[in-house]
Amino acid sequence: MISWQLLPFNKLSTNQLYQLIKLRIDVFVVEQTCPYPELDGKDLFDGVQHLLGFNNGELIACARLLPGGISYDNVSIGRVATKQTARGSGLGHQLLTQALQQCERLWPGQSIDIGAQQHLTPFYQRHGFKEISEMYLEDNIPHVDMRLNK
């Protein structure tokens, strides 16, 4: 059973912060062999929330929810990650469903934009997102911008 928590940066415990940074670096830097500035400063902005999914005290899923005007003009979801050993059980869909529910609670009726890795577009399309850009390279990984219109 996954326990979900939604917290602003300044409410994360040191243990939660450590697990969050470790999971994001494990996925985005180590697994994808992509050295890039994981700590981009956006975690600290007012209104940014961190969705954390724990299983028996271990962080296995996370996403960053951002109000409009930080990453995109619209509300956005980023840093969507699941622990490698927890994949294949539908955890990613649970995580995105939780993220969408929390965005609706925080910013009702607002469209949501994401910068998706191109190979994951079918995953996001299953949740109603549609491509709104051509492919572009971000850190040498093909991405497309996608939007969920409200």
Image (cartoon, grey):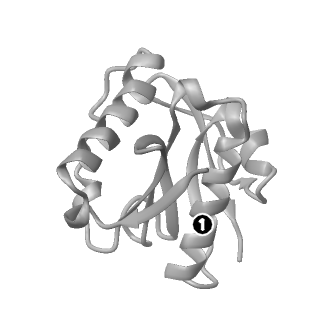
Q: Foreground residue, 90 or 41?
A: 90
Q: Foreground residue, 20 or 144?
A: 20
Instruction: Give the quarter of the figure containing the C terminus.
Output: bottom right
Judged from this view, the residue extending furthest toward the bottom is: 108
Amino acid type for the residue under numbered disc 1: Ile
Where does residue 103 sit, x and y in percent of width and height?
A: 55, 72
Q: Is residue 146 visible?
A: no
30 lies left or right of 2: left
81 lies left or right of 40: right
Q: Is residue 82 visible?
A: yes
Q: Residue at x 67, y 60 (%)?
A: 97
Where does residue 75 sit, x and y in percent of width and height?
A: 50, 69
Vertical comparison of 150 with 63: above or below: below
Q: Give the residue at mark 1.
A: 112
Asked which quadrant contains residue 66, the reply is bottom left
Where does residue 112 sit, x and y in percent of width and height?
A: 59, 66
73 lies left or right of 38: right
Vertical comparison of 116 with 102: above or below: above
Judged from this view, the residue extending furthest toward the top is: 33
Q: Secondary structure at mark 1?
A: strand
Q: Residue at x 29, y 49 (%)?
A: 16
Q: Residue at x 47, y 69 (%)?
A: 73
Where does residue 27 sit, x and y in percent of width and height?
A: 45, 27
Count the numbered circles shown.
1
Vertical comparison of 110 with 70: above or below: below
Q: Residues within 10 Å of mark 1 (few under 14, many from 20)?
A: many
37 lies left or right of 98: left
